[in-house]
Image (cartoon, rainbow, N blue to C red):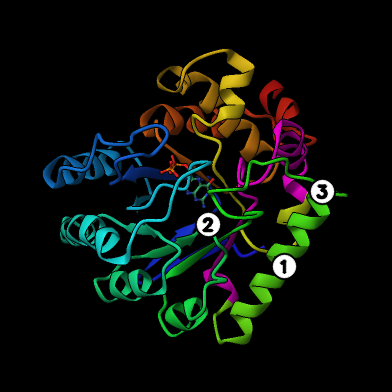
Amino acid sequence: MAAILRCGARALDLATPRVMGILNVTADSFSDGGRFLDEARAVAHGVALAADGADLVDVGGESTRPGAEPVPLEVELGRVMPVLRALVREGVAVSVDTMKPEVMRRALAEGCAMVNDVNGFRAEGAVEAVAGADAGLCVMHMKGTPATMQANPAYEDVVAEVRDYLAGRARALEAAGVAPDRIALDPGFGFGKDFAHNAALLSHLGRLAALGYPVVAGLSRKRMIGEITGRPVGERAAGSVAAALLAVQNGARIVRVHDVRETVDALKVLQALAAPAGGGQGEQRR
Ligand code: HH2
């Protein structure tokens, strides 16, 4: 697997797991909707996430929560671009979370380090919008659209289906000239998946990692965490940290989270203390 993910001028060294902090500049995101519509607050939060240890800050202007309606291009640009510009100016590595080729193009022109597309660069013109740049590309699997995706999703074999889809999208990007070390893959927890689908994907992240691209996992504060813990969205930090650790242990190299500081600490503990396969204890006894 590529030991680095190229993200524009930066290279993310994936020898250690990396953290992508979430910054939703939306009215209706399921967790932080409405909190960061104000530009100054959004920028301050993005800077804080980076200071807390986020390797990337993922700025989104369109909610993709189940049932969310699409946002017009001008609205999304108006939300995302000023925040993105200000964060780039502050030296923050910014990822843009969008399905729209025009937003991708404009964000790349402003120096964003990654484009994160929950739609897997399937929109007309999306591949072309990103191919010639050098930013990292996060390709996510989604079944259906945010408006409809949770209406009874069904798979024969969810892991194989998601893996084959992601492999196909990576091939399409590479065919358009994208270098493999710019590509990361994400199974899209909660995007057209019920609890059992999410659980199967989480325990088989290794099968996705076997494709040879770094795997991104986004479980933070999602319904699955609520179903397990019985907690409302604002009280899912501990459950989300546990899920992030599990994702990394199972093969993810980047986790997309709201609670950056807590996740960074937990990953440091995991890195320092998790027994390396077949030898950690022997080392300590000496
Ligand atoms: N999840 C969300 C949005 N973007 N991108 C990737 N790569 N992976 C994910 O799992 C993912 C994502 C949904 O979470 P959030 O951004 O917190 O909420 P909303 O879509 O309501 O803004």
Q: What segment is highlighted magenta in the picture?
A: 180-206
Residue identifier under label 2: 118
Check disc 3 and give the amino acid type: Tyr
273 up-or-down from 175: above or below: above
Q: Which mark is residue 52?
A: none
Compared to residue 126, the image places residue 234 above or below, namely above
Mark closest to the chain's N terminus, 3 or 2: 2
Front residue of this view, candidates 105 and 65: 65
Give the image quarter of residue 259. Answer: top left
Find the residue positioned furthest to the top. 230
Residue at image mark 1: 167
Q: Earlier in the sequence, mark 2 or mark 1?
A: 2
- Helix, strand or loop at mark 2: loop
Say whether disc 1 or disc 3 marks the residue closer to the N-terminus.
3
Can see residue 210? no
Q: Residue at x 68, y 63 (%)?
A: 166
* Distance in Å between CA atoms under marks 2 and 1: 15 Å
Q: Amino acid at mark 1?
A: Ala
Q: Position of residue 89 (x, y in %)?
A: 15, 61
